[in-house]
Image (cartoon, helix red, strand yellow):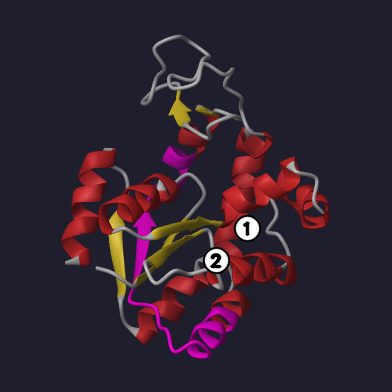
């Protein structure tokens, strides 16, 4: 699977980040999560982070020019292992820009995975999500519990609830996704290579299905 280029789509809370990390580990790919990259930029108070923060806290998409610049820099660092893009592209404009960017380097997208989950399940998942600000581990009050309540298992840091996981913000994010990102499904479906994966089950069940379709 060396050099494999994968995009994973899905609404916020669909589990695409968790699955992308597993895919990257299994196939030796770089996991490029634009959400993590943006949050890191915000935490480091970079110029891009300052511009992006106001959009992120309101559950809005970061403007194309900012996200394209960030992603382009990361893709340029590719070491031939291949990659999985998590959180990008999110708009048709971003998808078209990515296609041109890859064509310029003689690369192409091998597979697009679409994780499908009921919106109400997503609201519940994200409202109960907690993250470690130190090592980035992700937990859930219902499904992925810690050994010590409120404490990260590996590093012991206090877990936090991200501002964009508040229920009102989650519903706004889902509305934005449906309007601006869902059309990507049709875009990639027409180009071939799109695979729909049911994301309402357990983590292992979903991953097993992804491994099957990537063979």
Q: Quadrant of the C terminus?
A: bottom left
Instruction: Name the spot of residue 110 as percent of width and height, x first.
Output: 33, 77
- Mark 1, secondary structure of its residue: helix
Q: Give whichever of discs 2 and 1 has the lower sequence position.
A: 1
Instruction: Name the spot of residue 192 as percent of width and height, x first.
Output: 32, 82
Question: Where does label 2 land, which residue?
Answer: 181
Q: Is residue 35 magenta?
A: no
- Mark 2, secondary structure of its residue: helix
From the viewer's perspective, tell me whether residue 178 is left or right of residue 206. Answer: right
Q: Quadrant of residue 108?
A: bottom left
Question: Where does label 1 land, which residue?
Answer: 176
Cα separation, mark 2 vs mark 1, equals: 7 Å
Neighbours of disc 1 within 10 Å: few (<14), some (14-19), many (20+) = some
Instruction: Name the spot of residue 182 as percent of width and height, x first.
Output: 50, 66
For the point 24% across and 57% down, the residue is 210
Q: Quadrant of the N terminus?
A: bottom left
Q: Quadrant of residue 48?
A: bottom right
Neighbours of disc 2 within 10 Å: few (<14), some (14-19), many (20+) = many
- Viewer-proximal residue among 1 and 198: 1
Find the magenta span and give its range: 97-122
Please identify the residue farthest to the top as the structure is shown.
Answer: 148
């Amino acid at each position: 699977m060396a050099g494999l280029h994968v995009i994973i789509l899905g609404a916020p809370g669909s589990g695409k980040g968790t699955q992308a990390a597993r895919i990257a580990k299994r196939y030796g790919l770089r996991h490029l999560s634009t959400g993590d990259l943006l949050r890191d930029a915000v935490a480091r108070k970079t110029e891009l982070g300052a511009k992006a923060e106001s959009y992120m806290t309101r559950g809005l998409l970061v403007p194309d020019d900012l996200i394209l610049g960030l992603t382009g820099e990361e893709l340029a660092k590719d070491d031939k292992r291949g990659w999985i893009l998590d959180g990008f592209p999110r708009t048709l404009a971003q998808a078209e820009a990515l296609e041109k960017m890859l064509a310029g380097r003689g690369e192409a997208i091998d597979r697009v995975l679409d994780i499908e989950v009921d919106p109400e399940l997503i609201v519940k998942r994200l409202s109960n999500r907690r993250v470690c600000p130190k090592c980035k581990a992700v937990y859930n009050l219902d499904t992925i519990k810690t050994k010590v309540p409120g404490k990260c298992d590996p590093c012991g840091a206090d877990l936090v609830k991200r501002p964009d996981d508040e229920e009102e913000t989650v519903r706004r994010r889902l509305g934005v996704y449906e309007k601006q990102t869902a059309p990507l499904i049709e875009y990639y479906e027409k180009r071939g290579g799109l695979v729909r994966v049911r994301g309402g089950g357990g983590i292992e069940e979903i991953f097993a299905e992804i491994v099957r379709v990537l063979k």
